[in-house]
Amino acid sequence: MIGRDQVIKVLGRLLSSGPIDHLPKKFSDTELLMALAASSFNAKQEYSEKEVNDHLVNWLKGFTCPTGLDHVTVRRYLIDLKFLLRNPSGSSYWTNEAVIALVLESEASTVHPRDVLAEVQRQREERKRSNV
């Protein structure tokens, strides 16, 4: 399981060049990103496909490039990696808390990549100002 500090460190590395436009090459980084996406859902709620899509579109805003990583790709990975489960007809989705817990410690699940990117950008600007 990955703790909060390690999640922030990995996301900082992934976001060091700015918003991401594709899934990470390393499986462990993709798995971490998917676990964070899954943990952003309410564990006690079932979602329609439209609700999942809307939630993921909102979750991706602020740390991905608009023409890069999309909610459909993320939804497919969430299903493939078993972070999200769905009924056979695909009309109802819910989180798989047991699988999320294999990847993330509970306090780590509250980290949002958008916040890490904002901090990376703030630190970059601070370094620029101090080098002037």
Image: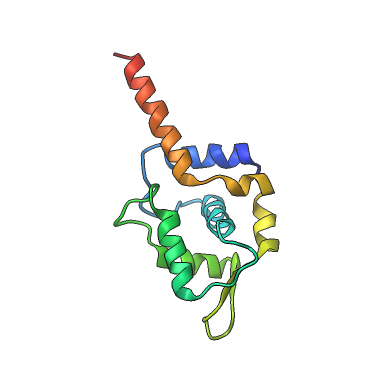
Seen in the picture, residue 25 relative to 93 is either above or below; the reply is: above
Where's residue 51, x and y in %?
47, 70
Residue 18 falls in image quadrant? top left
The reply to whether residue 77 is visible in this rendering is: yes
Where's residue 58, x and y in %?
42, 57
Seen in the picture, residue 88 relative to 43 is either above or below; the reply is: below
**Residue at 66 percent of width and 45 percent of height:** 107
**Residue at 33 percent of width and 21 percent of height:** 128
Q: Is residue 67 left or right of residue 119?
A: left
**Closer to the camera, 80 or 127?**
127
Seen in the picture, residue 53 relative to 7 is either above or below; the reply is: below
Q: Residue furthest bottom?
A: 89
**Colour scheme in use:** rainbow
Q: Is residue 97 left or right of residue 41?
A: right
Where's residue 55, x and y in %?
46, 62
Where's residue 2, x and y in %?
65, 45
How many numbered marks does the figure carry? 0
**Residue at 42 percent of width and 27 percent of height:** 123
The reply to whether residue 1 is visible in this rendering is: no
**Quadrant holding the C terminus:** top left
**Closer to the camera, 48 or 116?**
48
**Residue at 56 percent of width and 53 percent of height:** 36
